[in-house]
Amino acid sequence: MSVDATMVPIELEQAGQTDRSAQIKAARSLGYALLGMSLLLACWWVGGYMIRNNPAMSAFADFAPGPALTRLAEMVASGEAWAMTLPSLERIMHGMLIAIALGVPVGILIGRFGFLREITNIPFQFLRMISPLSWMPIAVMAFATWDGAIVFLIAVAAVWPILFSTAAGLRRVEPDWFKVARNLGARPWHMLFTIILPAISQDILTGIRLALGVAWIVLVPAEYLGITSGLGYAINDARDTLEYDRLAATVVIIGVIGFTLDFICQQVISKLSWHRND
């Protein structure tokens, strides 16, 4: 009993130290994040100051943080920010769903079967290196609507990170797992859902995260096509009407939404990680 009575305070003290370490680590991470954002805002302010005091560039003074953030608050309060964001999110969602529906099965096939990997390696690498925006004229001719063309461009941009990440993840799976499963009478369908998908789930999500970043970058120039909605259209319209404060505010919106989407993917990946620090 005396030993147990001694151990309890020690365990409580260790638990308290662990909590304090976690709090210190979280505070440090928050401090670094705030410092990084402060430096970014400082650079933005310096750039705006230099533009405002340069007679040749004074017309672009509304790019500065003051006018841009003021206009951003007005856009959020009036609902304009959400109205321009929703169509873009819908196009991203549709394009990503198509990329996932194509990339994951094809990635599993070329990761599982060596002869398919040999056959498709050069064609896929060749297609991957073509800029997604190069397909724009073909997309315009092939699809009846502008939205269809934009979704196609997003899917073309997003499919490759998902496909190659899925294939690479499957190639790292221990081959003995499949031998044991076959010896136990597992059919291909069982191996897919019992071995393959659980083993490569983190690789698939990593590929989706990378694909989402690429798709988000492609989205804005893709929305320069003949549409009247979305963040890309808002950028183009603000440029044409010389509303540089609205243009800068829209750029901030694009950055915030892109960061949020990436953060969500990162958190999902960390939850599925097999290497967590408890």
Image (tube, grey):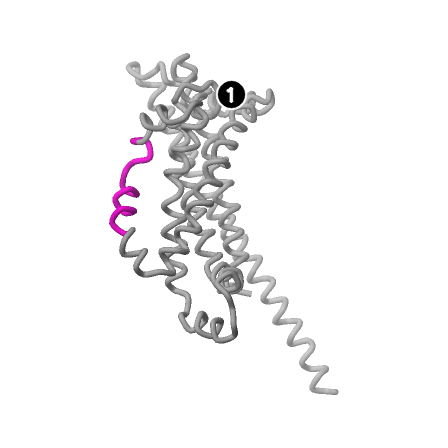
- Does residue 90 show up magenta in the picture? no
At horizontal 59% and vertical 62% (from top left) the residue drawn is 20
Residue 208: x percent and y percent?
Answer: 45, 47
For residue 229, side relative to residue 58 (left or right): right
Residue 142: x percent and y percent?
Answer: 37, 27
Structural crowding at the residue carrying mark 1, measured as other residues with C-alpha within 10 Å and reported as few (<14), some (14–19) or many (≥20): many
Residue 258: x percent and y percent?
Answer: 47, 37
Inspect the image, locate mark 1, and give the three-letter code of the amino acid beneath it: Arg
Q: Which residues are magenta?
A: 121-134
Residue 88: x percent and y percent?
Answer: 49, 29
At horizontal 44% and vertical 56% (from top left) the residue drawn is 203
Q: Nearer the viewer, residue 246 or 196?
A: 196
At horizontal 40% and vertical 22% (from top left) the residue drawn is 63
Label the magenta part by its dominant secondary structure.
helix
Residue where numbered disc 1 is placed: 71
For residue 254, side relative to residue 1 (left or right): left
For residue 111, side relative to residue 180 (left or right): left
Q: Nearer the viewer, residue 159 or 1?
A: 159
Residue 161 vertical position relative to residue 81 in the rendered view, above or below:
below
Residue 99 found in image quarter: top left
Looking at the image, the residue that sits furthest to the right is 1
